[in-house]
Amino acid sequence: MSVSAIRESYDEYADRMSRFEPVDRVLLGRYRRARFGDLDGRVLDVACGTGTNFRYLPDAVDLVGIDVSPEMLANAEETLADLDRNGTLRRMDAGDLEFPADSFDAVISALSTCTFPDPVAALREMDRVCRPDGTIRLVEHGLSDVWPIARFQEWRADAHYAKSGCRWTQEPRELVESAGLPVEDVSTGPFGMITTLEVTPTRNAEP
Ligand SMILES: C[S@@+](CC[C@H](N)C(=O)[O-])C[C@H]1O[C@@H](n2cnc3c(N)ncnc32)[C@H](O)[C@@H]1O
Protein backbone atom coordinates (compact mmCIF):
# COMPACT_ATOMS: atom_id res chain seq x y z
CA MET A 1 0.00 0.00 0.00
CA SER A 2 1.14 3.57 -0.64
CA VAL A 3 1.65 6.04 2.21
CA SER A 4 -1.61 7.81 1.26
CA ALA A 5 -3.58 4.54 1.22
CA ILE A 6 -2.19 3.69 4.67
CA ARG A 7 -3.12 7.17 5.89
CA GLU A 8 -6.72 6.77 4.70
CA SER A 9 -6.95 3.33 6.25
CA TYR A 10 -5.66 4.51 9.65
CA ASP A 11 -7.78 7.66 9.56
CA GLU A 12 -10.74 5.26 9.61
CA TYR A 13 -9.30 3.11 12.43
CA ALA A 14 -8.34 5.98 14.73
CA ASP A 15 -11.41 6.15 16.98
CA ARG A 16 -11.61 2.37 17.20
CA MET A 17 -7.95 2.20 18.25
CA SER A 18 -8.56 4.75 20.99
CA ARG A 19 -11.44 2.63 22.31
CA PHE A 20 -9.16 -0.44 22.21
CA GLU A 21 -6.52 1.25 24.39
CA PRO A 22 -7.69 -0.28 27.73
CA VAL A 23 -7.35 -3.74 26.17
CA ASP A 24 -3.90 -2.86 24.82
CA ARG A 25 -2.95 -1.77 28.33
CA VAL A 26 -3.76 -5.23 29.67
CA LEU A 27 -2.15 -7.17 26.80
CA LEU A 28 0.87 -5.05 25.94
CA GLY A 29 1.28 -2.48 28.72
CA ARG A 30 4.08 -4.35 30.46
CA TYR A 31 6.07 -4.76 27.22
CA ARG A 32 5.74 -1.07 26.40
CA ARG A 33 6.70 -0.09 29.96
CA ALA A 34 9.71 -2.42 29.97
CA ARG A 35 11.11 -0.92 26.75
CA PHE A 36 10.13 2.70 27.14
CA GLY A 37 9.90 3.31 30.90
CA ASP A 38 13.57 4.20 31.49
CA LEU A 39 14.06 6.77 28.71
CA ASP A 40 15.00 10.38 29.21
CA GLY A 41 15.80 13.51 27.23
CA ARG A 42 14.14 14.26 23.89
CA VAL A 43 12.14 11.25 22.67
CA LEU A 44 10.58 10.72 19.23
CA ASP A 45 7.63 8.33 18.95
CA VAL A 46 7.50 7.31 15.28
CA ALA A 47 3.97 6.44 14.08
CA CYS A 48 2.60 7.34 17.49
CA GLY A 49 -0.98 6.55 16.45
CA THR A 50 -3.43 7.51 19.18
CA GLY A 51 -0.59 7.97 21.67
CA THR A 52 -0.75 4.54 23.27
CA ASN A 53 2.95 4.71 24.19
CA PHE A 54 2.74 8.07 25.94
CA ARG A 55 1.65 6.78 29.36
CA TYR A 56 4.71 4.51 29.54
CA LEU A 57 7.25 7.30 29.05
CA PRO A 58 8.62 9.07 32.15
CA ASP A 59 6.98 12.46 32.77
CA ALA A 60 10.28 14.30 32.35
CA VAL A 61 10.86 13.34 28.70
CA ASP A 62 10.50 15.97 26.01
CA LEU A 63 8.02 14.06 23.83
CA VAL A 64 7.61 14.43 20.07
CA GLY A 65 5.18 12.19 18.18
CA ILE A 66 4.76 11.85 14.45
CA ASP A 67 2.20 9.97 12.41
CA VAL A 68 0.96 10.08 8.85
CA SER A 69 -2.71 10.01 9.85
CA PRO A 70 -4.36 13.29 10.95
CA GLU A 71 -7.15 11.37 12.72
CA MET A 72 -4.60 9.37 14.70
CA LEU A 73 -2.87 12.62 15.65
CA ALA A 74 -6.17 14.18 16.76
CA ASN A 75 -6.69 11.21 19.08
CA ALA A 76 -3.06 11.50 20.25
CA GLU A 77 -3.74 15.15 21.22
CA GLU A 78 -6.62 13.92 23.38
CA THR A 79 -4.35 11.32 24.96
CA LEU A 80 -1.85 14.04 25.89
CA ALA A 81 -4.67 16.07 27.45
CA ASP A 82 -6.05 13.04 29.31
CA LEU A 83 -2.58 12.27 30.69
CA ASP A 84 -2.05 15.98 31.47
CA ARG A 85 1.32 15.98 29.77
CA ASN A 86 3.05 18.12 27.16
CA GLY A 87 4.20 16.96 23.78
CA THR A 88 4.60 18.05 20.20
CA LEU A 89 2.72 16.17 17.50
CA ARG A 90 3.43 16.47 13.80
CA ARG A 91 2.12 14.86 10.65
CA MET A 92 5.03 13.21 8.90
CA ASP A 93 6.06 10.14 6.91
CA ALA A 94 8.29 7.77 8.88
CA GLY A 95 10.26 7.14 5.71
CA ASP A 96 11.18 10.80 5.34
CA LEU A 97 11.53 12.38 8.78
CA GLU A 98 11.72 16.18 8.74
CA PHE A 99 14.32 16.39 11.54
CA PRO A 100 18.06 16.98 11.32
CA ALA A 101 20.43 14.14 12.17
CA ASP A 102 21.09 13.51 15.87
CA SER A 103 17.90 15.32 17.01
CA PHE A 104 16.75 12.83 19.67
CA ASP A 105 18.13 11.01 22.71
CA ALA A 106 15.75 8.13 22.03
CA VAL A 107 13.57 7.02 19.14
CA ILE A 108 10.72 4.63 19.84
CA SER A 109 8.07 2.93 17.74
CA ALA A 110 5.39 0.34 18.46
CA LEU A 111 3.35 -1.96 16.23
CA SER A 112 4.21 0.14 13.23
CA THR A 113 7.05 -1.21 11.09
CA CYS A 114 4.53 -3.76 9.78
CA THR A 115 2.58 -0.93 8.14
CA PHE A 116 5.39 1.16 6.64
CA PRO A 117 5.53 0.81 2.85
CA ASP A 118 9.34 0.81 3.16
CA PRO A 119 10.17 -0.30 6.71
CA VAL A 120 13.92 -0.46 6.05
CA ALA A 121 13.93 3.20 4.98
CA ALA A 122 11.93 4.11 8.09
CA LEU A 123 14.36 2.26 10.39
CA ARG A 124 17.31 4.04 8.75
CA GLU A 125 15.53 7.34 9.32
CA MET A 126 15.11 6.45 13.02
CA ASP A 127 18.84 5.71 13.10
CA ARG A 128 19.69 9.01 11.39
CA VAL A 129 17.68 11.24 13.76
CA CYS A 130 18.88 9.42 16.90
CA ARG A 131 22.04 10.71 18.57
CA PRO A 132 24.96 8.27 18.30
CA ASP A 133 24.91 7.80 22.09
CA GLY A 134 21.10 7.48 22.12
CA THR A 135 18.88 4.44 21.86
CA ILE A 136 16.22 3.06 19.51
CA ARG A 137 13.49 1.00 21.14
CA LEU A 138 10.82 -1.03 19.34
CA VAL A 139 7.79 -3.05 20.42
CA GLU A 140 6.64 -4.97 17.37
CA HIS A 141 4.53 -7.93 16.40
CA GLY A 142 5.29 -10.73 13.97
CA LEU A 143 4.90 -14.39 13.13
CA SER A 144 3.98 -16.53 16.14
CA ASP A 145 6.25 -19.36 17.26
CA VAL A 146 3.14 -21.43 18.05
CA TRP A 147 2.50 -23.62 15.02
CA PRO A 148 -1.33 -23.35 14.63
CA ILE A 149 -1.27 -19.59 15.17
CA ALA A 150 1.59 -19.16 12.70
CA ARG A 151 -0.22 -21.24 10.04
CA PHE A 152 -3.36 -19.15 10.56
CA GLN A 153 -1.33 -15.93 10.20
CA GLU A 154 0.28 -17.22 7.00
CA TRP A 155 -3.08 -18.35 5.60
CA ARG A 156 -4.67 -14.93 6.27
CA ALA A 157 -1.58 -12.78 5.56
CA ASP A 158 -2.72 -11.41 2.18
CA ALA A 159 -6.29 -10.77 3.33
CA HIS A 160 -5.05 -9.09 6.51
CA TYR A 161 -2.70 -6.87 4.51
CA ALA A 162 -5.45 -5.92 2.04
CA LYS A 163 -7.76 -4.97 4.91
CA SER A 164 -5.38 -3.11 7.21
CA GLY A 165 -2.05 -2.60 5.42
CA CYS A 166 -0.37 -4.68 8.14
CA ARG A 167 2.20 -7.41 7.31
CA TRP A 168 1.55 -9.62 10.32
CA THR A 169 4.02 -12.35 9.35
CA GLN A 170 6.93 -9.93 9.25
CA GLU A 171 9.79 -10.89 11.59
CA PRO A 172 10.81 -7.76 13.54
CA ARG A 173 14.34 -8.87 14.40
CA GLU A 174 15.11 -9.94 10.82
CA LEU A 175 13.77 -6.64 9.57
CA VAL A 176 15.94 -4.59 11.93
CA GLU A 177 19.02 -6.61 11.00
CA SER A 178 18.26 -6.28 7.29
CA ALA A 179 18.29 -2.50 7.79
CA GLY A 180 21.84 -2.87 9.14
CA LEU A 181 20.95 -1.80 12.69
CA PRO A 182 22.68 -3.63 15.56
CA VAL A 183 20.30 -5.35 17.99
CA GLU A 184 21.49 -4.85 21.55
CA ASP A 185 18.73 -6.75 23.31
CA VAL A 186 15.63 -8.67 22.28
CA SER A 187 12.75 -10.27 24.13
CA THR A 188 9.54 -11.92 23.07
CA GLY A 189 5.98 -11.82 24.39
CA PRO A 190 2.79 -13.89 24.15
CA PHE A 191 2.93 -16.82 21.68
CA GLY A 192 6.13 -15.32 20.24
CA MET A 193 3.97 -12.75 18.46
CA ILE A 194 5.45 -9.75 20.28
CA THR A 195 9.11 -8.87 19.91
CA THR A 196 10.67 -5.97 21.78
CA LEU A 197 14.07 -4.67 20.79
CA GLU A 198 16.76 -2.30 21.96
CA VAL A 199 18.81 -1.13 19.01
CA THR A 200 22.13 0.71 19.07
CA PRO A 201 22.45 3.59 16.60
CA THR A 202 24.86 2.54 13.85
CA ARG A 203 27.23 5.44 14.53
CA ASN A 204 27.78 4.06 18.03
CA ALA A 205 28.14 0.41 17.02
CA GLU A 206 31.37 -1.57 17.24
CA PRO A 207 33.21 -1.55 13.87
C1 LIG B 1 -1.08 -0.19 14.35
S1 LIG B 1 -0.88 1.55 14.49
C2 LIG B 1 0.20 1.66 15.90
C3 LIG B 1 0.08 2.97 16.59
C4 LIG B 1 0.86 3.14 17.90
N1 LIG B 1 2.29 3.20 17.67
C5 LIG B 1 0.54 2.06 18.89
O1 LIG B 1 1.44 1.39 19.38
O2 LIG B 1 -0.64 1.88 19.22
C6 LIG B 1 0.19 1.92 13.13
C7 LIG B 1 0.42 3.42 12.96
O3 LIG B 1 1.41 3.65 11.96
C8 LIG B 1 1.04 4.82 11.26
N2 LIG B 1 1.78 4.83 10.00
C9 LIG B 1 1.73 3.92 9.01
N3 LIG B 1 2.57 4.24 8.03
C10 LIG B 1 3.19 5.39 8.40
C11 LIG B 1 4.19 6.21 7.81
N4 LIG B 1 4.73 5.90 6.62
N5 LIG B 1 4.59 7.31 8.47
C12 LIG B 1 4.07 7.63 9.69
N6 LIG B 1 3.12 6.89 10.29
C13 LIG B 1 2.69 5.78 9.67
C14 LIG B 1 -0.45 4.69 11.12
O4 LIG B 1 -1.08 5.90 10.78
C15 LIG B 1 -0.82 4.18 12.51
O5 LIG B 1 -1.07 5.24 13.40
Image (spheres, rainbow, N blue to C red):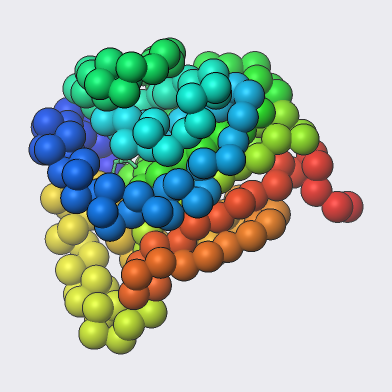
Q: Quadrant of residue 72?
A: top left
Q: Position of residue 139 (x, y in %)?
A: 45, 51
Q: Is residue 96 above or below residue 182?
A: above
Between residues 149 and 32, which one lies in front from this camera angle? 32
Question: In this orientation, does residue 95 appear?
Answer: no
How far from the left and from the top, in percent, is residue 142? 37, 63
Q: Is residue 77 above or below residue 68?
A: above
Which residue is found at the position 61% from the left and 51% from the top? 198
Which residue appears at 39% of the width and 72% of the height?
192
Q: Is residue 111 visible?
A: yes
How many numbered markers are drawn?
A: 0
Provide residue 154's location: percent of width, then percent of height: 26, 73
**Camera-side residue of 75 and 31:** 31
Left or right relative to 29: residue 21: left
Locate residue 167, reporting x and y percent. 31, 56
| Quarter of the rendered image showing ligand 1 | top left
Q: Residue furthest right?
A: 207
Q: Residue at x 55, y 22 (%)?
A: 60
Q: What residue appears at the point 18 percent right and 68 percent down from the top-left corner?
A: 156
Quadrant location of the N terminus? top left
